[in-house]
Image: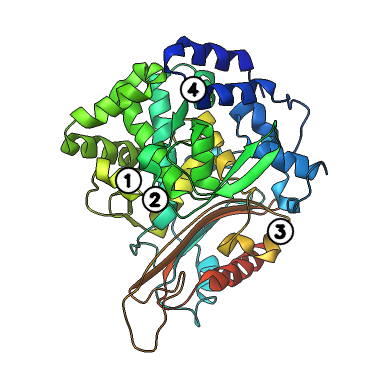
Amino acid sequence: MQSYQFSTILLAMLFNLETLTMKKIYLLIVMITMPTLSSFTYSYPLDGYNHTLIRRLLRIQRIEDGKVKDKGLLPGQKLGIDEIKLRLLGDRGSLLDSLPIPDPGFQKALNALFPVLHESYSIAVMDISPDRDIRYATRNETRGFQPGSVGKLAILAGIFTELEHIYPDSYQDRVNLLCNKVVRAGNWALPNIHTVPVYDPVKETYQKRLLVDSDMFNLFEWVDHMISVSSNGAASVVWREVVLMRAFGKDYPKLNEEEASAFFKKTPKSELRSIAMSVVNDPLRKLGITEKEWRLGSFFTSGAKAMIPGEGGSTGTPSGMMKYLVAMERGKIVDESSSLEMKRLLYLTDRRIRYASANILNEAAVFFKSGSLYKCKPEAGFSCGKYMGNVENYMNSIAIVEHGDSTIYLVALMSNVLKRNSGSDHRALAEKIDKLIRN
């Protein structure tokens, strides 16, 4: 992996010197004084720091090295950047332009897992282990759910799509932009409920806190916050930047905050909404994912919604999510390099939750995104709790699981069980699915 040159940051930021704030200057100093990590061989994106400039990785690296006291990583979280591969390239994935017909034996085994689970449970599972034929099984795979934070994967596809439009001939230029471009949160990121890791590698200070409007991160860090800790504020900021990429095209890299603010003020909201819906939904359509299978309809924070109103709501299905995972493994989301970068960003080096928290997966590499949404109303004898809504109570997970014995499979799971935190059910189901596939 080519090492990132810090002089590139200096030149890029000094190019618009008059727009530098003290916060940008401080970030520049932090970046310049960070050590190089060319010899690090820990899990992505840990040893990918030179590639991404995601600062939280330095702290986790120092934990792994015993220099900082905190909980270390699970065995399955220690893949190196070059060990993460796309698994359906070439002939193996060529038969998957559409989802396959379920395998009778595999389907029967999957059906046997569900007698005692709520009827809303919907799932698609694909075994792509290289030493056997591809097997597929489903349950209610076309049922629509509010996707919650799993919908952020549409934004992930959107940003890599727009990066390709800006730099069609150079993937390295796209990576450089993700590293170089530092943007402020603004009201777009507010309010938010998920904390993000904020690490100063020079002062060695660390905190997990809510975003504030003055926070500044490079685009890679914003995307990492959106995926690794599922920050709604980060998702809105990334989506905002994707809109700006579409609007300004090749001029986006030099765009400053004042110009961006002026654009949002002068452009009719109907036009902004049209652009916003296009940049996150068109990439899904290009993958053969229909509007009924998956669409994203609104931003994730009220601050962002005040700037760009939503349209039509969001929906997702296990079949739509499975098509996304297959396309990524085939290198078909933009191109192979973009698909591989997206898979690296999904590699779970943060705390494993819900489906991914199953102990049976501790030694497996897990590429993961979870999402939930719950809503309550007054009801006699019922006390509303987190993830225990009595009106709606969506809990969703997508996962790619890779074991050291070459067992590799994809899962898209969605449910809406009222008044029950389904996290433990998802974890138990993960155990059963893993045993089913490996045995």
* Residue 350 appears left or right of 135: right
Which residue in the structure is indicated by mark 2? 191
User: Which tag, 4 or 2, sits closer to the chain's start?
Assistant: 4
Residue 119 at x, y percent in the picture: 41, 77
- Answer whether labels 1 and 2 touch (C-beta < 8 Å): yes
Q: CA distance from mark 2 to mark 3?
A: 34 Å
User: Which tag, 4 or 3, sits closer to the chain's start?
Assistant: 4
Residue 333 at x, y percent in the picture: 44, 36
Q: Nearer the viewer, residue 315 or 89?
A: 315
Which picture quadrant has residue 372? bottom left
Disc marking residue 177: 4
Residue 287 at x, y percent in the picture: 38, 41
Q: Secondary structure at mark 1?
A: helix
* Residue shown at 46% from the left, 70% from the top: 386
Disc marking residue 159: none
Which residue in the structure is indicated by mark 1? 303
Q: Amino acid at mark 1?
A: Gly
The quarter of the image holding the N terminus is top right
Q: Secondary structure at mark 3?
A: loop
Circle nearer the viewer, 2 or 3: 2
- Answer whether labels 4 and 3 touch (C-beta < 8 Å): no
* Residue shown at 28% from the left, 38% from the top: 276
* Residue 120 appears left or right of 80: left
Q: Amino acid at mark 4?
A: Leu
Q: Residues within 10 Å of mark 1 (few under 14, many from 20)?
A: some
Residue 79 at x, y percent in the picture: 71, 42
Q: How many marks?
A: 4
- Answer whether labels 1 and 4 touch (C-beta < 8 Å): no
Q: CA distance from mark 4 to mark 3?
A: 34 Å
Q: CA distance from mark 4 to mark 2?
A: 27 Å
* Residue shown at 41% from the left, 19% from the top: 253
